[in-house]
Image (spheres, rainbow, N blue to C red):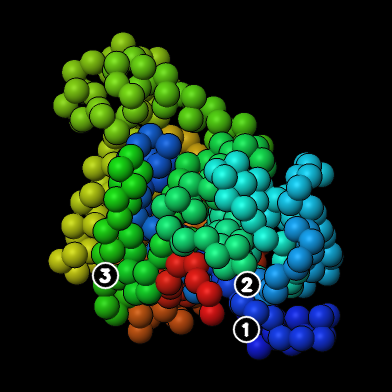
Amino acid sequence: MPVEKPQLVAHFAARFAAAPKWVVHAPGRVNLIGEHTDYNGGFVLPLAIDRAIWIALRPRADRRVVVHSIDFDQSGEFSLDALVHDGNGWIEYLKGTAWSLQEAGYRLTGWEGVLAGDVPLGAGLSSSAALEMAAARAFAAVSDLPWDVVAMAKHGQRAENQWVGVNCGIMDQLISAAGRADHALLIDCRSLKKEAVPFPPGVAAVVLDTATRRGLVDSAYNERRAQCEAAARFFGVPALRDVGLEEFARSADGLDDATRRRALHVITENDRTLRAAEAMRRHDVQELGRLMNESHRSLRDDFEVSSEALDAMVECARLHAGCYGARMTGAGFGGCAIALVRSEAADDFVRGAASTYQQRIGLMPAVYVCRAAEGAGVA
Ligand code: GLA
């Protein structure tokens, strides 16, 4: 259900008999290339998508946060003076963000509001980062905090790592905070420098949801992180970002087979990501697609985070003549693939890829033709 701002304002008015003081939003994201590189100090190339989480709100005088989620038809509230964990529902992402901001010394003001979104949940399009960044944008508006995208992304990541308990990198929160319309962002996840790279004209980013969800992902994700850290220790560097292909070729034989292949993925993926940004700058979509295909192979065979459904989806996408390249996107094990498709062919591509996938896997995929959108903002 795409959320329209007027609908959200109408919900707010029905609940509070007044107009909201602010309407804030933060988008989901899709990553073009640069997967499992962010927590290795490497490079990523995501775009914020035109699907977001929205919050309409007004201040309260009593330091409480009172929120109604339209999508869950559920209300929640907490006091900023006594933040305590309570299960793992959507409100924990708001609490965790408040916790991180308060830990940093910000004095927050309470608020009440309504929340809705159209980022599919658990699909690998970063609905949780969108919720954290929407919460950060709400707290910044109501408490009059400076909106520094990098600082706010770090608060979102800290909420996710330490409050929610998922050990993610910085990519999702940073692109949700800092996305640029019609651009992808090349992010150096060590320096956190970002460069906006124009999305090639005449090309559509199509997100293909396998309709499978990642099970046991946190343990597999943490295991991959630990293997990458072990490999970095083996090479005697702070992170795999610091290992080049030549050095890898010289000494990787000393690693066990699985750790060696994890490191190989990260090192080659960093290189592909830089080359993909370069290809985008010169509008070389063929090369960009080729690098995305190669990224998928590496994630499937070396990093081993793909799945039967993701592999099938990627193969179905590539069967279409209008497709430049396709790969799984996000953490993996389920969720979405992304394909780059010639814009005029997009409708035909969507029909073809969806029905071939359905015949093969027996599940109906959701398909989103996405536009690169601005990051979090106050509407
Ligand atoms: C998840 C994490 C990100 C990143 C990707 C894999 O989306 O939240 O930080 O590690 O997986 O690239």
Pointer 3 or 2: first along the chain? 2
Residue position marked by numbered label 2 in the rendering: 54
Tell me the number on the disc at residue 89: none
Q: Quadrant of the C terminus?
A: bottom right
Q: Residue at x 28, y 63 (%)?
A: 196
The one of 121 and 156 positioned closer to us in this rendering: 156
Q: Residue at x 76, y 47 (%)?
A: 81
The alpha-carbon separation of the residues under discs 1 and 2 comes to 8 Å
Is residue 4 visible in the rendered image? The answer is yes
Q: Given this view, does label 3 or label 1 mark the residue nearer the observer?
A: 1
Pointer 1 or 2: first along the chain? 1
In the structure shown, which secondary structural element does the residue marked by tag 3 occupy? strand
Q: Position of residue 306 (x, y in %)?
A: 50, 44
Q: Given this view, does label 3 or label 2 mark the residue nearer the observer?
A: 2
User: Is 100 situated left or right of 198 in this image?
Assistant: right
Q: Residue at x 26, y 64 (%)?
A: 197
Are the residues tagged 1 and 2 within 8 Å (C-beta)? yes
Are the residues tagged 3 and 1 within 8 Å (C-beta)? no
Residue position marked by numbered label 1 in the rendering: 5
The one of 24 and 128 positioned closer to us in this rendering: 24
User: Is 285 situated left or right of 72 in this image?
Assistant: left
The one of 11 and 351 positioned closer to us in this rendering: 11
Amino acid type, residue under disc 3 in the picture: Pro
The alpha-carbon separation of the residues under discs 3 and 2 comes to 26 Å
Residue position marked by numbered label 3 in the rendering: 198
